[in-house]
Image (tube, helix red, strand yellow):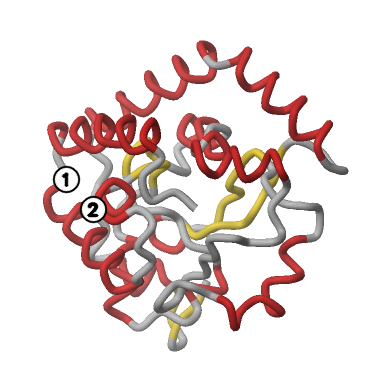
Amino acid sequence: MEAEGLTLAELLSDELVPMPAWKRGADVAGALFGILFLAPLFALVSLAVMLDSRGGPFYRQTRVGKGGKLFTCWKFRSMHTGADRLVGQLMEQNEANGHIFKMKDDPRRTRVGVFLRKTSLDELPQLWNVLRGDMSLVGPRPPIPAEVIRYDLPHLQRLVVVPGITGLWQVTLRGHHDFADMVALDLRYARELSPLLDVKILLRTVTTVLTGSGSC
């Protein structure tokens, strides 16, 4: 991707935060354990998705990772096939502030998809992205290219670390879709990156998911 004549990698080259060995080790171990332990759940969710609506169980989308690198992000499909084409028609109902699109009662979601979003089960296939190194267990959520194109230069700082399945924003302001707050929390995470912070976020993620607080 490019911005103002420069690639994002060039713009952020001096700002990128190296992936610590402890973090990559935790990612590989956690992703492998999750994929193996949750294999029966993967099968059940896949079957439910296919029985509920037309199409396959998985949804692939291009996302922007660390330094502007594009990668394919995997999720369980929670919307009807072709839902991406309807974003423009729903933009006036966007409930988020800034360069993100969020809609609590999104009509594109399937019946099973509502449950998957509520429980965050739709995110589980991203364990494969973690294993590949495109994502981490903890980090800023990876944006789509159409969002990044509209970023101001300060917003690009959220791309200096590897994106994650869960992060500081999700466990702090889940359900509050203010882009400025999201960026502020992502930058705070990049500054304070540590094993203890990751453990705290993962533990709070479990509580947040189990209680369903702020989900949409």
What residue is drawn where x is 31% and y is 68%? 12
Which residue is more in the foreground, 23 or 109? Answer: 109
- Residue 83: image x %, image y %? 75, 61
- Residue 54: image x %, image y %? 87, 43
- Is residue 21 depicted above or below 15 in this figure? above
Q: What number is the disc on residue 193? A: 1
Left or right of residue 163, residue 114 in this image: right
Label 1 and label 2: CA atoms lie apart by 9 Å
- Residue 108: image x %, image y %? 71, 59
Which comes before the other along the chain, label 1 or label 2? 2
Label 1 CA crowd tier, 10 Å (few <14, some 14–19, many 20+): some
- Is residue 49 depicted above or below 67 in this figure? above
What residue is drawn where x is 55% and y is 44%? 117
Which residue is more in the foreground, 143 or 70? Answer: 143
Question: Are the two marked residues, 1 and 2, in contact with CB atoms closer than 8 angstroms?
Answer: yes
Label 2 CA crowd tier, 10 Å (few <14, some 14–19, many 20+): some
**Snapshot quadrant of residue 107:** bottom right
Q: What number is the disc on residue 17? A: 2
Q: Amino acid at mark 2?
A: Val
